[in-house]
Amino acid sequence: MSGLTYWPLLRGRQFDLLALQLLTQENLLTDRIVPIIEPIRDAAVLPRLLKLRNRAGLPTVVIQNPSVGTYGLDNQKRYPLTAALADPQILQGWWWRPELAVPPNQVLLLDDPQLLPPAAIIRQARYLVVPSDPRILHAVQHPRRIFLHDPWPRVWRTQEFGQYADTPLLAEQHWAAAHGFVGISDYSLSGAPYFDKGWAQGTIALHIAYFRDGGVWLHHFLPPAASGPQAVQFQRLQAELRRWLASHRHSILWDAPLRELLHYGDIDHYPGLGVIKKLSVAHQILSVQHTLS
């Protein structure tokens, strides 16, 4: 890999994994994208995805000690990852914990400024994922550092996106490259806070990536208040999306996921929130890849 790379930290939610599966199957990804997958549940889609990426020769990081979800609590796995993890394309990722024996030449992730690893542990890491906390950024050095930040808006309900029109997704890449980082990472379209059990929400939203100021931004689409069932909301969002795309047509990557999302509007079919999220994540990843390339 040469140049700045993108390491999205995906919490192993099904729509995240299906987005990666879609992009890998269609040969749309390069080694400029190195997903970090934190397993949250013992599910069939993860070993299937890893096998697919291994066959394609694409690098993937799998966190071995997940900090969220229930995957780490299951001693007997219905869908073990042993065979996939043996492939050289897979890198082991580890959240640094003093009680763990982290193997050398893998990916070490830091998250606590009060519990930084010894210099010898840092030196033996192949990559070091460093959060945007200045106490950590200035305390640890490594020739292959990945800058982990979270630009996703802090909202707890979908309706709260109404206070935002646009938010930056990839705007730190030049700063990161100038400060010696080899990659940039974020939590994609979910944000750092993790909720194992969400709640049903009646409001849906679209988050569409576009190019702005040399980076990638997100435009948030919300239906009008009291728009009725989600299928009706989706129709109204499609109309708003198309109006917005008409005035931003030169700022958009017209890729397959975006075209598929628009196709559902053409045939007046609501595909469900999971499909919308899958296509949105896929479009976001491809937009970042295009910018970094």
Image (cartoon, grey):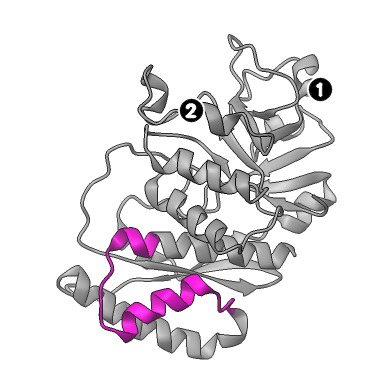
Q: Position of residue 136 (x, y in %)?
A: 69, 30
Q: Report the amino acid beneath label 2.
A: Pro
User: Is residue 5 found inside the magenta-colored segment of the image?
Assistant: no
Residue 123, label in figure:
1
Quarter location, residue 262: bottom left
Task: Indicate left or right for 251 with 124 as reference.
Answer: left
Is residue 159 or residue 29 the one in the foreground?
29
Q: Which residue lies under the disc numbered 2? A: 66
Measure the C-alpha gap from mark 1 to mark 2. 23 Å
Quarter location, residue 63: top right
Q: Residue at x 70, y 27 (%)?
A: 106
User: Range of the magenta residues?
Assistant: 252-277
Is residue 48 or residue 28 the one in the foreground?
48
Q: Quadrant of the C terminus?
A: bottom right
Magenta part, dominant SS? helix
Is residue 98 or residue 26 the one in the foreground?
26
